[in-house]
Image (tube, rainbow, N blue to C red):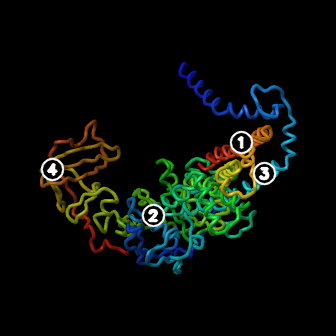
Amino acid sequence: MDDTGFNPIMAEARVNQPIVQLEDVAKTYGGAVALARVDLTVHAGEFFTLLGPSGSGKTTTLRLIAGFERPDKGKILLDGQDVATLPPFERAVNTVFQDYALFPHLTLVENVAYGLRAKKVPKPEAHAEAEKALAAVQLANFAGRKPAQLSGGQRQRVALARAMVNRPRVLLLDEPLGALDLKLRHQMQQELKRLQTETGITFIYVTHDQDEALSMSDRIAVFSQGKIEQVGTAFDLYERPASAFVADFVGNSNILGTTLLRPEKLHLVPHAHAVPEGYEKRHGIVREAVYLGAVTRTIVALEDGGTMQVMEANIVPVHGALRFVPGDSVTVAWPRSACAVIGGEYNKGEQ
Amino acid sequence: MRSETLIWAAVAAIFAFLFIPILVIVLYAFSAAPIPAWPIAGFALHWFGDTWHDEAVRQALALSLEVAAVATLAAVLLGTLAAMAVARMQSATKEVVSFIAVLPIALPGILTGMALAAYFAFWGMNLSYWTIVAGHATFCVVIVYNNVVARLRRMPRSLTEASADLGADAFRTFRLVQLPMMASAIGAGALLAFALSFDEVIVTTFTAGAQNTLPLWIFGAIRLGQQLPEVNVVVFAIILFTAIPVLLAQKLIGESGKVAR
């Protein structure tokens, strides 16, 4: 037992060994395609995120792993064993639900002990474990209360304790922070990451929030229209997107043909100003300039059509004025090394 | 201020319209005269004793209670199961089945009664205690079903999923999650069903053989103009009997509304 209150999974889990594998999985709901074809490997001990807009198939994938849905075809391997036809109660995974799904008629300790009791752990032991788990999420004094007496953030932590107390092989989290306000969400992101690192439990995390995905995940799968567009680290997705969709969904982007230019890698100079060796440039007119504190965002309408977005860090404060205002003629410049080719050979990574 | 006075006047008028006849019957139960007449000349309590010792009334009361109890039990089992089945259906099927399930209560009692009588006759079944129970069950089931379906509609699907996710099989989920969450809805439905069965006349007329339920006994006595003081006493008793379960049911529905949030 470590100071998280949850028993850590032993270190053997850390060697890149597959724990969840989806092979050629497809799922339709009454004719509507939810998952077209998905292949996916999650390694033991990973914080793995399924990222995508609503309706992209990320939640369906999670529900298939949990066992709430059955795939139309394909295999779902958990520790190498095909569980596609097993009911949820026979799978060694636990879920943190988007609406928390706490049992309203049970106290917190009964809620958290529910999974242990289902596994025939005697009541005194199950309740003792549950109380430890509640203490691990700072709710030690709330054991006798009902869920209705808690705030949203507290319910979220109970849901987490209720799932983690069972020491699942894999913890599935379905947009667990969606209902919390921004500050609480950032706090819980750190808390989740800490629990994941300290327990070594594999997390599969569903979100539509790219900041959340980039800040917590070891690897991320980007979903669009029932397919995986790319699997990779935050760096891979941002710097070497495999498709225009990924380039656009993750972060802000300027796309010139198949070339991706991230706004923070661009510079603005007065019109026709000389640019250094190895730089490319485009001329245009400032359409919009917004001071955002840390950065200033400038939208430039290019001479040869289209627009570019430029983010410049406000390192040297320009007193009382923006460096460029709408109507100014400017030149956008960037080093050739800042260009990324969308879908370039080296971007594919593993699928 | 004026509009408030008007509203209170309207409420008072409606209550008077609804409850004065009942109040008159209750007063008649205490009248000494063998044939109820207004104004009441003198008061007596002996009709209560007489009615209680009347063998026909006792048998009718026993039959009514028994029928109501058995019909309610059947309604609880069938209504709850039907509601759980409907809750799992896809929306298109759900609407059709829901409509069919609720139909018996929308049909006039006289239709239900005639149809049942014809059906029993077709199979050569004699009208008996069980045919009365079957008749009452037709509408009692709907009452329980409606209550439970409404509860299940408000119960998020994620609760049963969470239970399964935590290792509970279907039966354990039913016992520990679904049943406790439906309990007050089932209870309220059962109490209403009991009250409805206890004072049902029309369907019972068609499905009872030689037996009398309490409402049938009243009906018969009034038609023949006999034992009118006893009728008043019985009606008074029925009012009390049916008011209690209805009150309890309302309390249950009110409370569980809060719990289900």
**Mark 1–mark 3 contact, CB under 8 Å?**
no
**Secondary structure under the numbered disc 4 in the rendered image:** strand
* Amino acid carrying mark 4 in the image: Gly
The lab-note entry on whether marks 1 and 2 share a chain reads: no
Point out the frontmost of discs 1 and 2: 1
The CA span between labels 1 and 3 is 19 Å
The CA span between labels 1 and 4 is 83 Å
Please state the chain letter of the residue tagged with numbered disc 4 in the rendered image.
A
**Mark 1–mark 2 contact, CB under 8 Å?**
no
* Amino acid carrying mark 1 in the image: Ala
Q: Which residue is mark 1?
A: B243
Residue A166's x, y, as percent? 63, 67
Look at the picture and state if A48 lies above or below A325.
Answer: below
Residue A164's x, y, as percent? 60, 64
Q: Which residue is mark 2?
A: A59
Point out the frontmost of discs 3 and 4: 3
**Secondary structure under the numbered disc 3 in the rendered image:** helix
**Secondary structure under the numbered disc 2 in the rendered image:** helix
The CA span between labels 3 and 4 is 97 Å
Q: Earlier in the sequence, mark 1 or mark 3?
A: 3
Residue A207's x, y, as percent? 44, 59
The CA span between labels 2 and 3 is 61 Å
The quadrant where residue A306 appears: bottom left
The lab-note entry on whether marks 4 and 2 share a chain reads: yes
Residue A42 in view in this figure: yes
Residues packed near mark 1 inside 10 Å, few (<14), some (14 to 19) or many (20 plus): some
Task: Give the residue furthest to the front.
Answer: B224
**Mark 2–mark 3 contact, CB under 8 Å?**
no
The CA span between labels 4 and 2 is 43 Å
The lab-note entry on whether marks 1 and 4 share a chain reads: no
